[in-house]
Amino acid sequence: MGAAVEPFYPKVEWHVLVETVHALPLYASHKAYVRDKILLSKPDITVEELVSRLGMTSGEAMVILWELRKTGGEVLQMLKVENVEKPRYTLAALGGTFSMIHVGHMALLLTAFQTAEKVIIGVTSDAYASTLSKQHPIPSFEERTAMIRRFLAAQGWAERSRMVKLEDPYGPTVEDPTIEALVVSPSTASRAVEINSKRVERMMKPLEVFVCPLVVAEDGQPVSSTRVMKGEITVEGRLVRRES
């Protein structure tokens, strides 16, 4: 499940645009810069603002933002679309606290299961989670893993997954040589550098790193467990409108 949902443009024209942009010599560096330097500080940046800031064409800006940023609605739609492509890797890993399952977590998990046949899901232990300075209450490890299992079962991914308890930021990624890929969120992408550095020190092959899209709510700001628990947005990224 989970093929990418394309923007509402004529199918042939959009595919041609994507292929053209991917062939541009600066596409890869532009995309990395937008992901690592721009989106985290200005998640609601527009195509026009990106064109002005980096001097790229509007077509390149459109494709890059489409690839790097999704709305909650787009993620939910992607989960409904069957993915017919065979994953490139045998085993991938990801990690998180998973205080709830919101559309940001869904995008992370979707990216992982598109990437690999099997996925190790690291879930922070209660002890480790208590050190992370989260701005919201954290359910117990048992409650959090139960939520994940229900979501995996609903998506048909349960048999392709294995959950492990994380007592540190790295877990099996720095110990298991059979892991081939690492899936991270935009806000935790820097952790991948640390993990690969530790793997190299231990004479293991670095992991291929995949960064899932940044998922934004209806107001253009990132979806987070803190925002959901504060009552600002729903787990789908919809704004909570209070009666005046």
Image (spheres, rainbow, N blue to C red):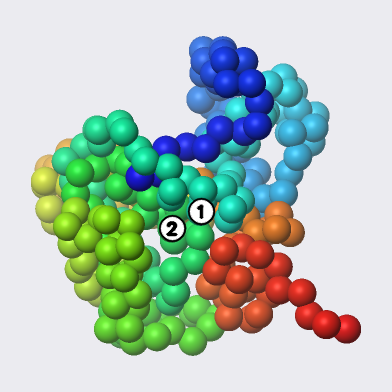
Q: Identify residue for label 2.
A: 106
Q: Amino acid at mark 2?
A: Met
The crowding category of the residue bearing disc 1, from other C-alpha atoms within 10 Å (few below 14, some 14 to 19, many at least 20), is some
> Could you tell me if residue 232 is visible in this image?
yes
105, above or below 212, in the image: below
Is label 2 or label 1 in front? Answer: 1
Q: Residue 71 at what x, y percent from top left? A: 61, 51
Residue type at numbered disc 1: Leu
Label 1: which residue? Answer: 76
Can residue 199 be spotted in the picture? Answer: no
- Disc 1 is placed on an element classified as helix
- Quick check: 38 above or below 164? above
Mark 2 and mark 1 residues within 8 Å of each other at the beta carbon: yes
Residue found 64% across the figure and 21% down from its top: 10
User: In the depicted view, which residue is nearer to us: 1 or 42?
Assistant: 1
In which image quadrant can residue 38 be found? top right
Q: Secondary structure at mark 2?
A: helix
Image x and y of residue 32, in percent: 53, 34
Assign the C terminus to one quadrant of the image. Answer: bottom right
How many numbered tags mark residues here?
A: 2
Q: Which residue occupies the foreground of this view, 220 or 128? A: 220
Image quarter of residue 115: top left
